[in-house]
Image (tube, grey):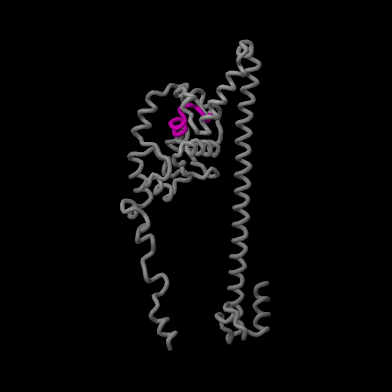
Amino acid sequence: MNWLLKFCTTPMIGFHEQPIIDRGHPHEDPETRDLDKKKLYNLLSIRNFLPPLTTKGVTREYLVKAYRNEVYTIPLYDLKHFEVELTLQMTKRAGMPNNSLLVRKIDGLLQSRHQPVLGFDAYEPPDEVNSSNKNWLYRVARFVDTHNILQFFESPVQQGDPTQAGDNPVHRTHFGRLKASKFFHRLPESRRDRKLWGQLHSINAAYKGYLCQKLMIEKLSYDMEQAMQRKSDLERQLDNLISQAACTYTTIEMPGVRAENIIQGDQSVSQEVRTHITLNSRL
């Protein structure tokens, strides 16, 4: 009788507590746990420059991290004052790389400065199509990269000082590249040769295209891996459903058979019953 008493006094699953959706998000901060996603977004967007709410990657998890300053965000006040001083040349893009590449490069620059990353997967960057803030990612890039280290713009906002690069590997690489470029163009004739300039621009454009294509292949490989995993999960789910249906049908055919015994692998289940289950599964 002890097992019966224990069973009767154990709360039934699903009835002991309210669902999470009714209880809010108890593991979050008091200021956010009772807010739905839209209200949380509105709370943050008052002071921070965020991607549109409907943008890919703007999940509740991302918004909570933004609230906790665990991802990089720009205060609206700072962004507006920064953009007032920008010229058209400073905002002109150098080509159109895909957003995945831009996210990856911005994250690398932020990490080199010991700052939080953007908080988006490089394979699933913010989708800005048909958005009122369709330039969000580039506006962030311009604010973060005033020296044009990432070379996504035609010109820098300010010229950097090589002596201030310190131990930052990204900054040191950038200033080293500028120094190498100056040495390469040391001959006056090379600076006046339009054919050479055209060839160099072609190399630069081809290299950016190569990086974008390489990242695209990585994304396709990632998608393929995810699709194969999903296929395996569905196969297991399908096998399980077929087995359940076969057991149910077998108990209809043979009323004396209990489904619980079949599912639990009871050794008392006869070979005849097992054969029926196998046949019904194939049907």
Q: Is residue 125 left or right of residue 276?
A: left
> In front: 188, or 12?
188
* Residue nearest the observer in this picture, 214 or 227: 214
Give the residue drawn at x 64%, y 25%.
203
Q: Quadrant of the N terminus?
A: bottom left
Q: Is residue 24 above or below residue 102?
A: below
143 sits to left or right of 35: right
Q: Quadrant of residue 211?
A: top right
Query: Which quadrant of the view contains residue 53?
Result: top left
As rendered, which of 15 and 108 lies closer to the eye? 108
The x and y percentages for residue 97 are 56, 33
The magenta segment is: 139-150
Horizontal and vertical percent position of residue 2: 42, 86
- Asked whether residue 14 is drawn in magenta, I would say no
- In the figure, is residue 37 to the left or right of 167? left
Q: Tell me where residue 81 sits by quadrant.
A: top left
- Looking at the image, which residue is at 57% across and 25% down? 177
Residue 157 position, x and y percent, is 45, 24
Q: Residue at coordinates 67% horizontally, 76% vertically from top-left?
A: 278
Residue at left offset 35%, top offset 48% = 40
* Front-most of residues 89 and 159: 159
- Which quadrant of the rendered structure holds the C terminus? bottom right
Q: Is residue 203 above or below residue 258?
A: above
